[in-house]
Amino acid sequence: MDVDRRRLFRLGAAGAAAGATAPAAAASGPIGMLGLDATHFGLHPGSAEDQSRILQGAIDEAVRRGMPLSIPPGRYRAGNLMLPRGAQLFGVRGATRLVLSAGGSLIAATGADHVTLAGIVLDGERRALPDRGLLQLEDCRAVRIVDCEIVASGGHGIRCVSVDGEVSGTTLADTADVAILSYDAAGLLIARNTIMGAGNNGIQIIRRETGEDGTIVVDNRIENVANRAGGSGQYGNAVNAFRAANVIVRGNRIRHCAFSGVRGNTASNIQIEGNSISDAGEVALYAEFGFEGAVISHNTVDAAALGISVTNFNDGGRLAVVAGNIIRNLKPRRPAGTDPGDAAGIGISVEADTAVSGNVVENAPAAGITLGFGRYLRDVAATGNVVRKADIGIAVSVAPGAAATLISNNVITGSGRGAIVGMAGRKPVTGDLSERGAEAFPHLMISGNRIG
């Protein structure tokens, strides 16, 4: 893949050089060794006129000849440009700017495989788009969007439907809705992008029916994600996977999102690893509803209403590993729009078939770790964790129906209400079970904890 990208950069540079040095030619365009110069089709940098027809003609001719199209630096007004199969558009990074003049999208492709955009700025000028992307791709394979900028979209930045390929090294800024939205991905890589300001979600991976997705979201920087559409968590997330199985979210830097840093809803086998999250309004890292399988490991969370939640055993949410995370500085309340009775100020919360090990939680106004809710507790092990400065160190359900739970070899210090406390729903109903009383609850095994 790196070899391919280097080749793309060479093509783009060569195309730009051709635009600067080639003599004027007929509308058919000069044939260079590596591509065609769009200005030789009558494209004029800086013109106030709509140049859609000219640019579309240049795209079509380049595809007909099986060659890339080079667009030199400048500002070009256009809209509703269609990419045929094999279209390859190259610009000068940060200097070649296409500006939306009219239409549902600036650039779109349907059923067009092997399309490439590199080094081009797409500027939506905040024109409203009806549930479309400034860049709209449908039923496309082997797509490459690299080193582009997508700014001021009045809808989504990039909207993909049944697409495989990659979006990488691209900046998306000031997006009214979702920066990168994918439906029914067929093998998508979203890597090393920068998202600065999105109205609803940063990256959203959706399947219309629950099933295999496999999108990889890696090494992106995502900041300032709002929740303009409202709701109780569908929006306002840096990364949101819905009904999408086997999604990997790794190594992303996420800051200031209205709800979650990473949210998996009915997303089985999700892997959330090595992300850095700060200032999340609700749950920083979330696996919820009807999923089976989640790995949440080696993340850092600083400032969230709840650090990690693995929940909804009542809807089939089960089977997880929560390991090696650092969670600190929890907030005492969730954002507006959520149930005012929802928990907050908690480091880690899990319910069923889950190992919680090697985590560090500090400064939790309610509890460092909560295990279960009412009867929704089964086969949970909390071992080798460090909990500091929490009102309750580990809160565990002792309601009728709660099942096998191991709490051992944890270090718990500075707990105001107790190191290990039994709960009925959200209400503490026991003293400190690390000292006495655990034998009254046969589903609990508590041993080897260091309390300070």
Image (cartoon, rainbow, N blue to C red):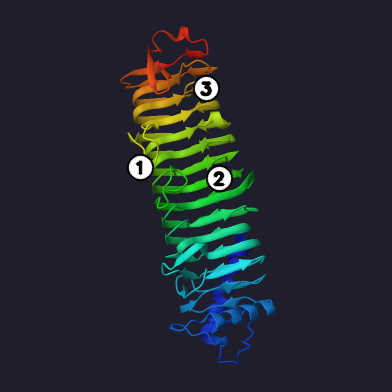
Could you classify mark 1 by the number of other residues whose Cα lies within 10 Å: few (under 14), some (14-19), or many (20 or more)?
few
Residue occupied by mark 2:
242
Return the disc, 1 or 2, that comes first in the chain's sequence. Answer: 2
User: Looking at the image, do the residues carrying marks 1 and 2 touch, with CB atoms under 8 Å apart?
Assistant: no
Judged from the image, the secondary structure of the residue bearing numbered disc 1 is loop
* Nearer the observer, 27 or 332: 332
Single out the mark in the foreground, 1 or 3: 1
Vertical relation: 306 (above or below) 412? below
Return the disc, 1 or 3, that comes first in the chain's sequence. Answer: 1
Residue 314: which numbered mark, if any?
Answer: none
**Residue type at numbered disc 2:** Phe
**Residue type at numbered disc 3:** Leu
Residue occupied by mark 3:
377
Single out the mark in the foreground, 1 or 2: 1
Q: Report, in whole angstroms, how far the alpha carbon at label 2 lies from the one at label 3.
A: 24 Å
Q: Quadrant of the N terminus?
A: bottom right
Q: Is 29 on the left or on the right of 440, as rendered?
A: right
* Nearer the observer, 239 or 5: 239
Residue 336: which numbered mark, if any?
Answer: 1
Name which residue lies at 46% across and 29% down.
Answer: 349
Residue 184 lies, in percent from the top left, at: 62, 52
Q: Is 406 on the left or on the right of 61, as rendered?
A: left
Return the disc, 2 or 3, that comes first in the chain's sequence. Answer: 2
Vertical relation: 450 (above or below) 337? above
